[in-house]
Image (cartoon, helix red, strand yellow):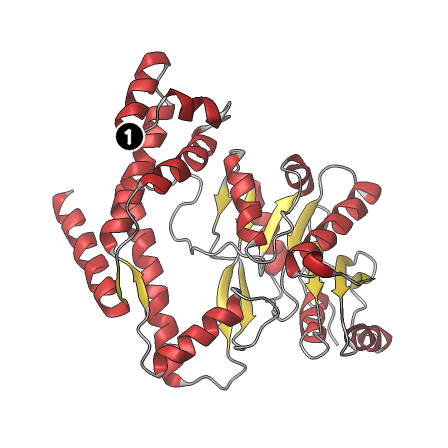
Amino acid sequence: MTLATATPIARPCVVCIPARNEAERLPLLLASLARQDGFSAEAPLRVVVLANNCTDGTVAAVCALQESGALATVALRVIEATLEGVQAHVGTARRMALDAGADWLDAETGPDGILLTTDADARLPADWVAANVAALRDADVVGGRLVIDDDGAADPRLAELHARIERYWAGVRRLEDLLDPPPHDPAPRHGDHTGASLAVPVALYRAVGGLPPLPCGEDNALVGLLRARGARLRHCPDVRVMVSSRHTGRVSGGMATEMARRARVLDGEPYLLPEAAHWQALVLRRAELRRAFHLAGPARAEACARLGLGAADLAALGDCPNDIAFVERADPILESRAPPARECTLDRALADLDALALSLRDAA
């Protein structure tokens, strides 16, 4: 085995992984972590595995991998936990893993450490840690692009569907670039910020109170807290992760649920998505909020009132350190008062996004 020999990573970091019954796929993830650039047996990559409620030999599989010598560039801590009742879900496990990682860095390296998290069934390219650390030079939190890992057995029809869905979300980002491009997240960028690939400094993680222990959506909830504090979220194209295409997962509403939905589409179920007009209205509304933030005194209040935010709403927002925080706190209020997004089929949505982008470019 060839060990990583690239330039050492500049900031201390730890990878935090929740795992339940992942005896088959977790060793593949750990092997990919052992191949990360910038680490060696003398300067290993810290990894925390929170093995919760495992009944399939997950811990034994990890121990066997360690004993084989395949993890020579990894400093691994495996924490076994039994979660009960309403706490027995991935949100609790991921929070425990991240908290353990934060404690490890605090004890050994001080306040400058970075927390990374991924899923136990993911696989990582060798530059994943290095790319995250590099992206954090100009951002406060980094999300990695999800690449569906079909393990060499992809149905061509499903692969084509994946590509069309990605085209849709790329079209949404294209509208944002035409109407209100985010300076802290320039194109090219992807749109993913899930637990499969997140990076955040320990100090910022602590400042927002840690990851919300939710049964589903704990990753997006953490990102929401970070952005509401004013954090710059970067969707760096250099950061990517291969995620499992399996249809039966460990949590309802996760990636496996989406993969099962896409499989049903091949059998005739329509894949519905918001119309292009929904995204245009959202981007323009958030742009108006950003401009309102930079106004002073009565001018800000008047601009916000035109958008539908009254004095009580503004008081509820509290002190916002920057326009990112202001938009992230104010927009959900306006979104809750807006009509539900109209949906259409994927083909119609793609055509509408392309037509809208063309009209905006022609008008520019």
Observer-nearest residue: 143 or 97? 97
- Count of numbered labels shown in the rendering: 1
In this picture, is 184 found above or below 303? below
**Looking at the picture, how far across and down is residue 275, in whole percent?**
25, 57
In the picture as drawn, the residue positioned furthest to the front comes out as 85
- Residue in the image at 46% along x and 84% along y: 154
In the picture as drawn, the residue positioned furthest to the right comes out as 67
Q: Which residue is mark 1?
A: 307
Observer-nearest residue: 167 or 91? 91
Observer-nearest residue: 263 or 350? 263
Q: Secondary structure at mark 1?
A: helix
Q: Amino acid at mark 1?
A: Leu
- Residue in the image at 55% along x and 69% along y: 242
**Looking at the picture, how far across and down is residue 276, in whole percent?**
24, 54
In this picture, is 162 found above or below 220? below
Locate the N terminus and report the quarter of the image it occupies. bottom right
Q: Is residue 139 visible?
A: no
Residue 195, by quadrant, is bottom right
Circle 1 Cα neighbour tier, 10 Å, few/some/many (<14 / 14–19 / ≥20): some
- Residue in the image at 38% along x and 24% along y: 293
In this picture, is 119 found above or below 318? below
Locate the C terminus and report the quarter of the image it occupies. top left
